Image (tube, grey):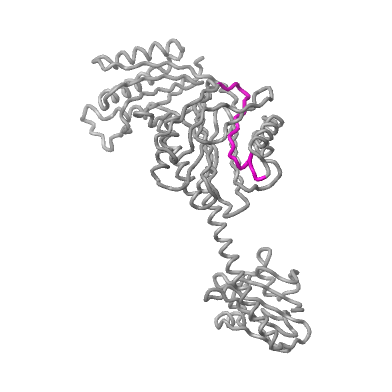
Amino acid sequence: LAADHVALAAVQDDRVMVTALDPPRPGAWPDVWRTEWRTEWPDAPLRALPTLQAALRDGRMDLWPAGTALEAGLAGIGAGGLAVLPLPAKGQVAGVCLVGWDRPHEFVPEERSLLTATAALVGQALKRAHAHDAEQELATMLQRSLLPRRLPELPGGTAVARYLPARRGLQVGGDWYDVIALSEDRVALVIGDVQGHSAGAATIMGQMRTAVRAYAIEGHPPDVVVSHANRLLVGMETDLFATCCYAELDLEEGNALFVRAGHLAPMLRLPDGSTEEVEVAGGPPLGILAEADFPMTAVELAPGTVLALVTDGLVEAADLPLDEGMRRTRVALAAADPADPGKMADELLGDDGRREDDVALLLLRYDGMRTRPIRAGWMVWRLPDAVMHARRFTARTLRRWKVQEAADAVLLVVSELVTNALVHTQGPVRLDLVLRGDRVRVSVSDSSPRAPAKPVIVDWEATGGRGLLLVEAMSDAFGSVPVAGGKQVWSEIAVPEGVP
């Protein structure tokens, strides 16, 4: 067009939001624009630009020849001629384009037709750009909401994760990861990949991550967790399937149980710097066969070992065979410094940018627990004097641990929790005592899934109903967690200072 000024702006909430300026210098545009110059490009209220406001309302092109008196908001843009082009798109006006000339300019019929056609094309392009931005924002929000915001702090290790979206499509996919703190000394790690790159794949991914987390927190062993998730996906009757690798790690002992459902084998970086793939007996991908078996594989980890779980986007591409990708990842794993797991994860991703497929990476450096707990357990017999035997076992254990100063509170808690379990549940009852540092943890497990309920109103003339209130009052921490086949009610009591 041989123009001297071009401004492209979208209309949002009665404001002109400038998308592009040529020339891009603030001094080349009216003062009212510079006062509203809030970000990289300015924006101005429509009420300050009545000429634009009228053009947008009517939806027709305005051509102003040289010498036309315009409002201050358009002063200096087109002294020799100004074209105001509303940008139509799907029956609406998506924005406006200003084209200005400094020298006198004649608007010939051919140029009028060119400007009209250009406005229609630019309006459609602007509408598509806004739709693309909204789609990408929705996809990004969906992906971020379905992945964990942060990973838990672990007493015997450090976990880090990375996720990179694919370069194609919605940049949202089915890769997921999770770190689930099952107890103070047990953690579950899971990584998976749902087939496809779409909002549907991301939705299935979110459902699978939620299901695996729920089954794990219930206290099921790894093979049962994966089996339940498989049955759930089969029942969804979707055309998509998922792969998954699940690991449960005892942070105190270093024992790990692995289950693999059509996923890549986990990798280990040993303390001496060597690497290896864990030979995990695999089952089929989730969502294919409801009666599939998912065997467990036990592996013992030494302190200093790094466990790496990856999805195929990291190790496989059109120009990268899977075996070669796994080899490169192992080489990078051996060369990385385990002192900084975050930097280690970044080095494994490399500097190739985003790949054809989305990538999920989960690392856990197992350090071992600094303070090893001392444990003792007792199966409570359903006899008239069962609580007495539980108290005697507890007293003997506290004397052996040399923490008798905490005995009064601990014995009261044991009495109340064991009594509640015997009176209100059926089946086996177990008492577990754990001494970790300066805290004694009392746990009573039973076969009822119902959490204990504290009375809302206590009748002080009644002989019962105060047990849980007493336990809560005597405990530094108190709660209930579901476990496989029932629940566990626990209480933590601090050992008085000065006790060895």
Where's residue 199, x and y in %? 50, 53
* In this rendering, position of residue 112 left or right of residue 228: right
Q: Nearer the viewer, residue 197 or 366?
A: 197
Q: Which quadrant of the view contains residue 229?
A: top left
Look at the picture and state if 441 lies above or below 347: above
* In this rendering, position of residue 320 left or right of residue 388: right
Membership of 309 in magenta stretch: yes
Q: Quadrant of the N terminus?
A: bottom right
Where's residue 370, x and y in %? 57, 22
Q: Nearer the viewer, residue 144 or 40?
A: 144
Look at the picture and state if 281 lies above or below 118: above
Q: Nearer the viewer, residue 162 or 330?
A: 330
* Residue for point 48% across, 32% down: 283
* Residue for point 40% across, 22% down: 442
Residue lying farthest right?
A: 103
Look at the picture and state if 172 lies above or below 391: below
* Residue for point 34% across, 29% down: 486
Where's residue 165, x and y in %? 60, 48
Where's residue 449, x and y in %? 32, 32
Look at the picture and state if 195 lies above or below 458: below
Q: Which quadrant of the view contains residue 10?
A: bottom right
| Stretch of the chain drawn in magenta | 300-318
* In this rendering, position of residue 377 left or right of residue 366: left
Membership of 190 in magenta stretch: no
The mark total stands at 0
